[in-house]
Amino acid sequence: MTTEPSGTPMPPRGRGAGCNPPNRFETLRIEADPTAHPDDDAPRHPTVYLRDDTQSVLSPNDADDLSFDYGLNPYRGCEHGCAYCYARIYHEYLGFSAGIDFEAKILVKQDAPALLERELARPRYRPGVISLSGVTDCYQPVERRLRITRGCLELLARFRNPVVVITKNALVARDVDVLADLARHGAAAVYLSITTLDPDLARILEPRASSPRARLAAIRMLADAGIPTGVSAAPMIPGLNDSELPSILARAADHGASFASYSLVRLPGAVADVFAGWLDAHRPMAKEKILNRIRATHDGRLNSAAAVARMRGSGEAAAAWKALFAATCRRLGLAQGTPKLGCGMFRRVMPGQDELF
């Protein structure tokens, strides 16, 4: 870990977090020696992939503010390293930290396609829209080699089960053939998440995600293949990237996006420490302004767990963003929110047998 002349710890190269905040469920913690020179025995943080032997991959969703029925996460943790990611706290349930651990210790569900096939084939399975993914990115860098997400999509295409893909990685365009097959049955939609159009900001805020230009190109490729494709301007961070909301929507529309969504940043638990550390390293003069403006959208806190408010915030500033988003979408001809996907084409396929309609 390097240090600026001011003494502010900088995230390791290619990482969004500059620390491993203590796990709220653990009593033991390791702290760096404050008297050591920053270059002495500097810790290295290579990515480690761990096998996840979970026996189920579909998580039912009953939240009214989320427009899907099941969540499917082929990985846990995310190497993209977005400093603001609310999903970091879920790594604490695994005994890890929400900091560097979240982006350097990735759990891999190698059996996800087989488990998904088993669950979709069960007579008691009720067809519904599946989200890929809610608490990780299903197209993080290792997916290029492991192809677990592609295997899941191939199963969903076989069953014609609707899916909404959300990703920051242009790698999604690799699977245009499978997604186009699903789209022909009204069973696929894809969001490319774009936080900023500034490549320099993206490089430090989302260090291992695709560049904004690559994400826009992926929107174009998917849309040209007939796949309903949109942009998620998320998260909007007041005082950092919120002024880009109209331009993100406009650039996405120019590249073929037909729908859009947005959300405001929220910083639950240890995520607040990770993001505050990022601000110390990269935006020290603006740190308090940004944090205070986030608090203004969450009733004086850095996070809200209430439905709707957790995604859109509350108060005057949040209302202004909502109005700006709606007005910009109308001007650009973008639909607001995810297109309706139906389960009418679902077909139950038993492993090793022909399709049963």
Image (spheres, rainbow, N blue to C red):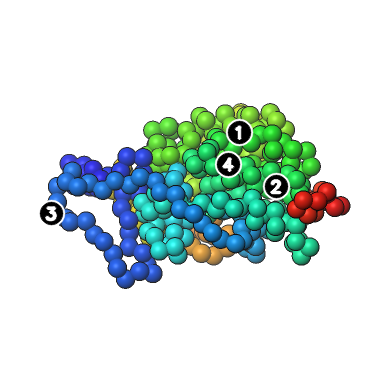
Residue identified by numbered label 3: 35
**Which mark is in front, 3 or 2?**
2
Q: Sequence-wise, which precedes: disc 2 or disc 1?
A: 2
Left or right side of 200 for 357: right
Q: Sequence-wise, which precedes: disc 3 or disc 4?
A: 3
In the rendering, at what x and y percent does residue 5 appear?
17, 41
**What residue is drawn where x is 64% and y is 44%?**
151
Q: CA distance from mark 4 to mark 2?
A: 13 Å
Q: Sequence-wise, which precedes: disc 1 or disc 4?
A: 4
Residue identified by numbered label 1: 174
Q: CA distance from mark 3 to mark 1?
A: 48 Å
Q: Quadrant of residue 57?
A: bottom right
Residue identified by numbered label 2: 155
**Which mark is in front, 3 or 4?**
4
**Which mark is in front, 3 or 1?**
1
**Which mark is in front, 1 or 4?**
4
Helix, strand, or loop for circle 3?
Answer: loop
Q: As displayed, is residue 333 above or below residue 120? A: above
Helix, strand, or loop for circle 2?
Answer: helix
Q: CA distance from mark 2 to mark 1?
A: 16 Å
